[in-house]
Image (cartoon, rainbow, N blue to C red):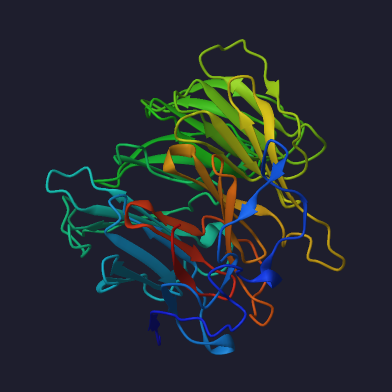
Amino acid sequence: MKVILGEAHSNNQDVSPETGREDLEDKLESDFRKGEQPALWAPGYPKAWGQEVWKFSTGHGDNSTPVNAVSATSDEKFLAIATVDTIVIFEVDGYKLASVLKTGGEEVHTVEFAKAARKDGGYVLASSYGQGYAEADRKVRIWHLDQDCKEASTSRKDDKIIVKGDLTTFAPTAFSHDSKTLLYLTNHRDEWGNHRVVVAIDVETGKEKYQMQGHTDSIMWTGFSPDDELIASAAWDGFLKLYSSKEGKLIRDYGPTGGQNWACAFDEEGKNLVVTRGGRPPSAFVWRTDDPRSFPVSLKGTSGWQRVISYSPDGAKLAIGAADGRLVIYETKAMNLIQVWQLAEEKDSYRWVKEVTVIEWLDGGKRICWTPMDGSLHVYDFESNVKWKWGPGKDDSWRPGAWFNTLVVLESNGLIGSKDQDGAFRIWKLP
């Protein structure tokens, strides 16, 4: 595998510190605004591919293999990039190679770092891999790494934790907040047939803690509450399930919602749980987790597939991304819709090329970052009403596809990374 690394410089003559790339300005039906004033471009923006500070790729065009997944450690010291059957780990400071992990010929689809709960510190890295997209062929491996991100010895005799299953696509993390438990999906067969179940395993030993059963269709999302006391799962059977994380016991079913459930999010206190579904509006609902008899609150302004949800760190805002190129923001006290960013319809455009698939918060919720599937990366500042954009220029080639969990925020380093639709991974200076 040939790897091309290094600092990239723009050759575009139509870029200046004042104007940016006019050909990259969005065609919008609705933009962020403050009062009656639409959002303003920051000086020198939008920026195009080629203006990044660092880039990882394995070649050019048909000779390259795409980056499949990326993740950074919470202390922002290391960055993992997966391509084909290889996970390459770099130091963020200087982008020096730290280690290389191999799956033995099977393609890596997902990687995620967590801080190790071991006394000696270090990190753990979860990866899902396997040939093709058949659920039966997928595996999940937990790599134990030392403080230099090299493989570390564990209490297991073979030092390997490999289970048959997969990590969810739409959940932002598979780990509990204390990094002691990992959730993955696998098949369970009983007298009623074959069903997907959520499995909780001990990260240190790889031993199964319990299984959470009951869904009758594909499970799209599973994750922990902020205090790690609860586990939620959402599935195409129209139900949202809430379990105890101590023994995996079912606490309550929420639903049916009337459609295929896609994503969930707990608020910062774990008292409210949002779920989105496909189908007619409204397609987002909020339930109370501390009231077993509560009815859901329907959110206005939601429609169609919405597969990414995120509460701001301060709990004041809720963001939801939709397949029609819409990003909506609610204030959480009354769940009022306060902002709508909407890409305009374009003739002969790909149906899914507009979907907002990733949402990240910056500065404790003062700024928001998101990506539609058109290859672009956006940031908006709620206080200054200023926006930034990075993306492919008119001469850049890229391909449509399902692009989730593509961002790496390195806020303390003043950087943001994006897995892009041309198969490369780019790091940009965060304004």
Q: Position of residue 243 (x, y in %)?
A: 48, 26
Q: Is residue 45 above or below residue 283?
A: below
Q: Nearer the viewer, residue 210 or 391?
A: 391
Q: Position of residue 42 (x, y in %)?
A: 56, 58
Q: Residue furthest left?
A: 120
Viewport quadrant of the N terminus? bottom left
Q: Position of residue 378 (x, y in %)?
A: 58, 56
Q: Is residue 69 left or right of residue 116?
A: right
Q: Is residue 123 above or below residue 243?
A: below
Q: Is residue 46 left or right of residue 159?
A: right
Q: Residue at x 50, y 68 (%)?
A: 68
Q: Residue at x 55, y 62 (%)?
A: 43
Q: Residue furthest right?
A: 347
| Residue 401: quadrant of the picture | bottom right
Instruction: Using the rendered image of the protein, determine whether residue 141 is visible from the camera's viewpoint.
Output: no
Q: Nearer the viewer, residue 273 or 21?
A: 21
Q: Position of residue 367 (x, y in %)?
A: 51, 44
Q: Is residue 182 left or right of residue 349?
A: left
Viewport quadrant of the C terminus? bottom left
Q: Is residue 429 left or right of residue 17?
A: left
Q: Residue furthest front?
A: 18
Q: Residue at x 53, y 89 (%)?
A: 63
Instruction: Using the rendered image of the protein, determine whether residue 358 is visible from the camera's viewpoint.
Output: yes
Q: Residue at x 59, y 71 (%)?
A: 421
Q: Is residue 63 above or below residue 423?
A: below
| Residue 233: quadrant of the picture | top right
Mark count: 0
| Residue 71: quadrant of the picture | bottom left
